[in-house]
Amino acid sequence: MSIIHFEDVSKRYRLNTHGQSVFSSARNLLQRMTGGQIADEHVLWALRNVELSIEAGEMVGIIGRNGAGKSTMLKLLSKVAYPTSGRVETRGRLSAMIELGAGFHPDLSGRDNIFLSGAIQGLRKAEIARLVEPITEFAELQAFIDTPVKYYSSGMYARLGFAIVQQIESEILLIDEVLSVGDASFRRKCLDRMRQMHAEGRTIILVTHDTWSITSFCTRALMMHKGQVESDGTPNEVITRYRQFERDEWLSRSHDAHESVSTELQIESIAYLTLEGEPTTEVDHDGMLIRVHYHAFKPVDEPVCVVRIRRLDGLVCCSIDTANIDMLTLPFIEGRGYFEARLPFLSLVSDMYVAEATIQHRRLPMILAREMGEVFRVKGKIVDASVNGVFIQKVFWSASVLENAPME
């Protein structure tokens, strides 16, 4: 028997109708009084006909764009909200961290809020008292535990919230994207703790935009889109589908309406290879090859290949091109071929990236072809508080102590 079950679940929200005409307001009021349907333009279906079962002991990652319905699913599970239609069933105690500061009273101290949260979960005072010290220690808030939480930063809220839910004995744990506000080292600590809880047999639902967390920690993944489960399977299968979806959306959004794209040239693929020429989607800092395969159906004059490496948030980390490479100043290209960029040292910080390639005319502001590659990963610790930024800079430090240095 499933520990979580959604049976044809839909959730509808009425949008703010402030500013609508008197006629529209009166019509919607009459429809509500008579049990009729509200006009579609004033309704948002956060979930639509969701069928889903989750077995005990699974660790499920839920991914999707903002507004896809991920957080709504967790709110229905934790009974913060109720479905418009359908049925949501859970078995066993459930603890949730689905909104920053949810359940906390701002005027109470961190310690008092631990007791409040425990009482909401049905724990006796003596049981809660035994949990205060381990919660405080995990949250690393010993110096602030008796401070009113209204003075906490968002990161401190996240620390206390997760520390509480991970200590409460429950069969199901729900974690929303709120962990993203914490620092990197604490996020890693939380993920390690979730791995431990999963090994103990607890069922964990993790909503996140971090694909690495899902592929590294989860046993199953769901992709939500427009209130429905678009994909359900292994983490690698679902993340591949999600990346393809993001890539297609990104490519369509980033396409400039003023660009002229030729029908005579097509970029067929963008390949990532090791320096030895082996195909890969994971590279290290020793370097990589990027091959842009094209098909010119007719001779294309004076082509220039441009490759931009983007972080997954869209930031252009670097841009390279063939414009000033004498040996690649080609009068034309025809048929199939490829441009290859050899990066002997990859100075990018360990993270997820994608290569965007364009072939354009050397002298004219004309994009002849454009394509986005798949996602690749630069190996290393992605979640590392000591590493941030875009690139790694080799540096040689020195220090000296000046004797009798003048005081400023």
Image: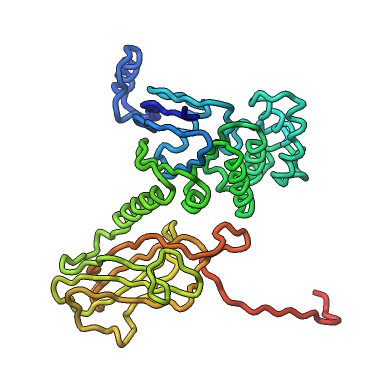
Left or right side of 194 for 20 = left
Q: Taking the image as drawn, is residue 12 in sight?
A: no
In the image as oriented, which residue stretches furthest toward the right?
404
Residue lying at 25% horizontally and 71% vertically, measured from the top left: 365
Residue at 63% x, 50% y is: 189
Decide which of 195, 8 is in the foreground and name it: 195
Left or right, residue 17 beside residue 119? left
Which residue is the extreme one toward the left? 298
Residue extending farthest front: 1
Asked whether 283 or 398 is in front, the reply is 283
In front: 300, or 384? Answer: 384
- Residue at the far bottom in the pictured view: 326
How is the protein colored in the picture?
A: rainbow
Q: Measured from the top left, where is residue 312 in percent x and y?
A: 43, 58
The image quadrant of residue 388 is: bottom right
- Residue 309 shows in the view: yes
Q: Which percent across, then down, holds residue 24?
A: 30, 23
Q: Which residue is found at the position 57% from the left and 36% from the top?
A: 202
Please say if 265 is above or below 108: below
Residue 13: horizontal and vertical position, in percent? 40, 28
Residue 361, above or below 212: below
Nearest to the observer: residue 16 or residue 135: 135
- Quarter in which the C terminus is drawn: bottom right
Quarter of the figure with residue 405: bottom right
Residue 366 falls left or right of residue 26 = left
Q: Position of residue 208 (x, y in %)?
A: 49, 45
Q: Is residue 340 left or right of residue 79?
A: left
